[in-house]
Image (spheres, rainbow, N blue to C red):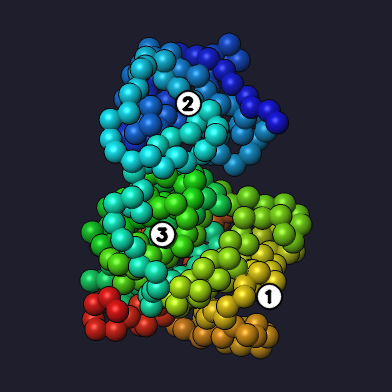
Amino acid sequence: MEIGLAKGQVVEIIKDGPVAEIKVATEIGLRDALHYSRLLGQVEVGHEVVINTTAVDLNLGSGGFDFVVVDLNNLPRKLQSSGHIMKLRYTPFQLKVWSEEEKEEILESITTPVILAELHSMLVPAAFGIWSQNPKLTVGYIMTDGGALPIDYSGAVGYLKKSGYQFLTYTAGDAFGGDKEAVNIYSALGLAAKECDVIIMGMGPGVVGTETILGTTALEVGTGINAVGSLGGRPIVIPRLMRGDKRGRHQGISHHTLTSLQKIALKPAEVVFTNPHWLEIDLKPHKIVLEKAPLLDYSALPLKTMGRGFGEEAEFFLTAAASGAYAAKQVGGGGERR
């Protein structure tokens, strides 16, 4: 195991906010870095910081940024709030949260429709698909720990928070920073079902993958089906449909989606498509649902998956939106939770 670290000085703040974009002068050159202000305090030019350079050194998909590990000018940082649940446990970066399980009773069974999203890029179209049917519905997003762990990293969540619609977030497992914290996806489902009409569950940005069938965090769709089904909820799956991916295993319906449905899922789910062509495939015991994509101004939404936009992957985004529309239609009473 290895970690790349460097010490440097902040020389420019490009963008301030919960995730500040900064430039850091180090012995290995000028580096672009991200600084999480909710964890590390407010950053200023001249601050001495330690950065994690690992992902950029390996040319991985962190957006070309290093991450600030500690802001030496903001020490000491003392604990001030309640709660004792640790996330990123037994690592140098462990942090304390006040999880909802410490505060309130959670539901032990649910009837809520839950959309399972394999990629974070499905979140925005799925949410607007829900609101296309009823703009008064409260949408809950459970961010799992299959991708990015800090929810502040998600531009999609920030966009939905500013949309004007009712949108609540829950961070489960080692993911952190949501409106409410949960120990695992089961308790997160029990929490979200108390105050949301439709739930979307899926990882943050940055799915982990290999060239193997089982070596990917995308398989959490299958375990998500099991969790929702075991609690009595209604699992609705967005299949990963791609045309522009050069990898054969992801062209058409991704092998990760099929593995989740055929090998991992122990409960039946509904799988939404917009093209009748997909009615020909056998996904038993799961039910194939044909749903029209809602009429949305897709060009106005921040849609991007694997670097490709709506024009290149229209079916991918239309299917996510249709899944949202279908889930919304399962909610009774004009937005009242059941």
Is 37 located above or below residue 223 in the figure? above
User: Which of these two is toward me, 302 or 223?
Assistant: 223
Q: Quick one: label 2 or label 1, which is nearer the N terminus? A: 2
Say the numbered circle drawn on residue 146: none
Q: Secondary structure at mark 2?
A: strand
Is 159 located above or below residue 251 in the figure? above
Q: Position of residue 94 (x, y in %)?
A: 48, 34
Disc 3 residue crowd, few under 14, some 14–19, many 20+, Cα 10 Å: many
Q: Quick one: label 3 or label 2, which is nearer the N terminus? A: 2
Is 209 located above or below residue 194 in the figure? above
Q: Nearer the viewer, mark 3 or mark 2?
A: 3
Quadrant containing the C terminus is bottom left
Say the numbered circle drawn on residue 68: 2
Which residue position is annotated with label 1? 262
Is 323 located above or below residue 51 in the figure? below
Q: Position of residue 142 (x, y in %)?
A: 42, 58
Disc 2 residue crowd, few under 14, some 14–19, many 20+, Cα 10 Å: many
Query: How much space separates mark 3 and mark 1, taking CA atoms?
Result: 25 Å
Residue 203 visible in the shown view: yes
Q: Amino acid at mark 1?
A: Gln
Tag 3 near tag 2, CB within 8 Å: no
Q: Secondary structure at mark 3?
A: helix
Query: How much space separates mark 3 and mark 2, taking CA atoms?
Result: 29 Å
Q: Position of residue 247 (x, y in %)?
A: 73, 59
Q: Nearer the viewer, mark 2 or mark 1?
A: 1
- Taking the spot 44% from the left edge, 76% from the top edge, the residue there is 233
Q: Amino acid at mark 3?
A: Ala
Query: How much space separates mark 2 and mark 1, taking CA atoms?
Result: 41 Å
